[in-house]
Image: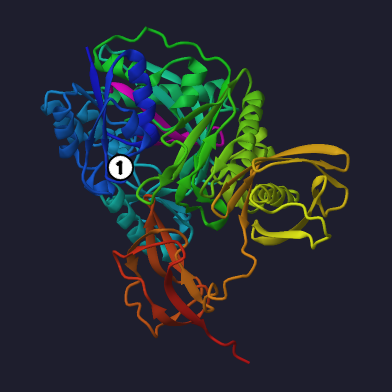
């Protein structure tokens, strides 16, 4: 009987597993890096052990330190979570060798399926050995790990070698294994997966399908269960293939078999020998706790002969601290507030006031809605996200809401190219024309309490300037003997205080909830930046300046690049690593590199000057 579990992971993953452990009466142990010293998972565990350092390679990827921590904390079992070492057979063996219970599949099963190339051979498939122009487009993939890291779509043969090099570098940094392979890329396919659960007594469950087609950078953004629009014959085929994959390696525990579905045909992709981030939609539909079932299987319990029946539909959206309109650039800063309406499940590793750093994945939370039908679940989730209070770094919240309401999604016609086709329309600024006025009135009320306010003599109107969606807005108001008034047509101020403003606009009353943190002002779901009365003349940069789009580490500079070099527009100059992803910084125009400040290994903050390209004059 397991009495104490160490979770070899962090953030939302660890918090989710701890929740189940508490319900089962099991003691919990966290491990944490130095940046995670005060993280939610560290604070909520019964005990916590420090892993010295910041980067994953120093901490959460050090299996020997985690085993040592488990023994020091008197844990009798280790749950790997999902990510980091969850698909590392050597880590599983070290846990077992230490006399601890491993809450996961046997090391031999992990080994057989952890490499995508070996998994394909096991299923009778082979990657491309030689690639020609006729094979284009192709997909370059890392053999180890997941999460879209080390993955590239290549459409031109002359780009293949460079993309292979980049994929190897990214895979090496993420998984410690630079093996990559090439396979045909299926245009217009849907990413569909099957949840499996197997015990030590020979029973293998398939718990329905999930559709994970909405992806950015080959990482999932939206998932749902069951996958809509699959015929009975195709569903039966997916179940059969998934059970065959599990039995081929004597699988035990929870896992996922992934497919690309196109034209009614399922193409095997890989088997993930772990729980997936999107497992809550399956839990909601089948009424199970997959973590609890993992623990029971690890204790030797037998599953029922048949799995439970499915009920209704569930949809999950991943809330990321990132800016989709700027190449999905990850964002950092303080998460001042995160709250969603009741009735929606929120799995998160953050609480109000927590910092969002550069070391880890930018996912803040997963929001899950369950309802009797797909349409109801989609509507429920979109409405909850639209009303959520998310104050802090830029997030993908508006993108999620618009994605859920897009006709291709509501009609279940989506595929993995959804964001390639629709990103511009989905990232158009979401603004409220009355948000700046509401913010100014709340600010004016606050200042009036400290000596501002109404004067007996007429005076100039008060003015405030805000930046909203990249555009400057100036609003005017007055203090009168009757209170604050707005200098805006057909607008009456019904109520104004520092946290709430009520306006009557053309006969319709609207309420605005106001929250301010520094110069950032949050008006309902609109974010504003309060501008100073006089702009800073030193804020401008020289033309051609390349600024760091995010905080991160310079991982490499283009070979042979030096000041004075001629560069072409779009030419990659250097690469930044932030939140487990590599980001390419390219020349904004053709010209001469007049300054290069970035060096490999350098830590940079957002807005740091990396290089300057002097654009060449057009020839007459």
For the magenta stretch, what is the residue range? Answer: 251-272
Q: Main secondary structure of the magenta part?
A: strand
Q: Is residue 309 visible?
A: yes
Is 253 a magenta residue? yes
Residue lying farthest to the front in this orientation? 456
Q: On the rendered structure, is 346 left or right of 51?
A: right
The one of 417 and 15 positioned closer to us in this rendering: 15
Residue 524 screen position, x and y as percent: 66, 41
Residue 66 screen position, x and y as percent: 19, 35
Image point (44%, 15%), residue name:
288
The one of 536 and 376 positioned closer to us in this rendering: 536
Could you say which quadrant of the image residue 76 lies in? Answer: top left
Q: On the rendered structure, is 358 left or right of 6?
A: right
Image point (21%, 41%), residue name:
51
Quadrant (top left, top right, bottom left, bottom right) of the N terminus: top left
SS at circle 1: helix
């Amino acid at each position: 009987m397991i009495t104490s579990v160490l979770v070899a992971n962090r953030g939302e993953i660890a918090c989710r597993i701890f929740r189940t452990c508490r319900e089962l009466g099991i003691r919990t142990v966290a491990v944490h890096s130095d940046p995670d010293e005060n993280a939610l998972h560290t604070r909520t565990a019964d005990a916590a052990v420090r892993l010295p350092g910041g980067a994953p390679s120093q901490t959460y990827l050090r299996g020997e330190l985690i085993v040592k921590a488990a023994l020091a904390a008197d844990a009798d079992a280790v749950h790997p979570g999902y990510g980091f070492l969850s698909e590392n057979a050597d880590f599983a063996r070290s846990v077992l060798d230490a006399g601890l219970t491993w809450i996961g599949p046997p090391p031999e099963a992990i080994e057989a399926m952890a490499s995508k190339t070996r998994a394909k051979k096991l299923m009778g498939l082979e990657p491309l050995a030689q690639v020609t122009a006729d094979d284009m487009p192709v997909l370059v993939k890392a053999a180890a790990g997941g999460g879209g890291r080390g993955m590239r779509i290549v459409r031109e043969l002359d780009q293949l070698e460079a993309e292979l090099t980049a994929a190897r570098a990214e895979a090496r940094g993420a998984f410690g294994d630079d093996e990559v392979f090439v396979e045909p890329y299926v245009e217009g396919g849907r990413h569909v997966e099957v949840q499996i659960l197997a015990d030590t007594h020979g029973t293998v469950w398939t718990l329905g399908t999930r559709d994970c087609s909405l992806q950015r950078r080959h990482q999932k953004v939206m998932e749902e269960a069951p996958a809509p629009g699959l015929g009975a014959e195709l569903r039966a085929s997916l179940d059969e293939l998934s059970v065959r994959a599990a039995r081929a390696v004597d699988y035990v525990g929870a896992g996922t078999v992934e497919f690309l579905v196109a034209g009614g045909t399922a193409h095997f992709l890989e088997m993930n020998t772990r729980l997936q981030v999107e497992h809550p939609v399956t839990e909601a539909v089948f009424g199970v706790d997959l973590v609890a079932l993992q623990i029971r299987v690890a204790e030797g319990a037998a599953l029922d002969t048949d799995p439970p029946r499915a009920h209704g539909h569930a949809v999950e959206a991943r809330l990321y601290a990132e800016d989709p309109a700027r190449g999905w650039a990850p964002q950092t800063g303080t998460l001042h507030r995160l709250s969603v309406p009741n009735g929606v499940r929120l799995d998160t590793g953050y609480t109000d006031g927590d910092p969002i750093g550069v070391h880890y994945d930018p996912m803040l939370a997963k929001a899950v809605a369950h309802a009797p039908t797909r349409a109801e679940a989609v509507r429920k989730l979109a409405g909850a996200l639209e009303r959520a209070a998310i104050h802090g770094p830029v997030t993908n919240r508006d993108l999620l809401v618009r994605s859920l309401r897009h006709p291709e999604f509501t009609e279940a016609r989506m595929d993995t190219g959804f964001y390639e086709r629709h990103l511009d329309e989905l990232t158009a600024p979401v603004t409220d024309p009355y948000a700046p006025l509401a913010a100014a009135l709340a600010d004016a009320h606050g200042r009036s309490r400290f000596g501002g306010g109404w004067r007996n003599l007429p005076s100039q109107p008060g003015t405030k300037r805000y930046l909203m969606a990249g555009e400057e807005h100036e609003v005017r108001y007055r203090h009168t003997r009757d209170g604050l008034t707005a200098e805006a047509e057909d607008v009456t101020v019904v109520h104004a205080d520092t946290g709430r403003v009520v306006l009557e606009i053309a006969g319709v009353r609207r309420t605005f909830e106001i929250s301010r943190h520094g110069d950032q002002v949050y008006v309902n779901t609109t974010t504003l930046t309060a501008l100073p009365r006089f702009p800073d003349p030193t804020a401008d940069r020289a033309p051609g300046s390349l600024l760091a789009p995010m905080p991160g580490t310079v991982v490499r500079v283009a070979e042979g690049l030096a000041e004075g070099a001629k560069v072409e527009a779009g030419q990659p100059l250097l690469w930044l690593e932030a939140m487990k992803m590599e980001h390419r910084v390219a020349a904004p125009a053709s010209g001469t590199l007049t300054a290069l400040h970035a060096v490999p290994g350098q830590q940079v903050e957002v807005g740091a000057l990396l290089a300057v390209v002097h654009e060449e004059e057009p020839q007459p």
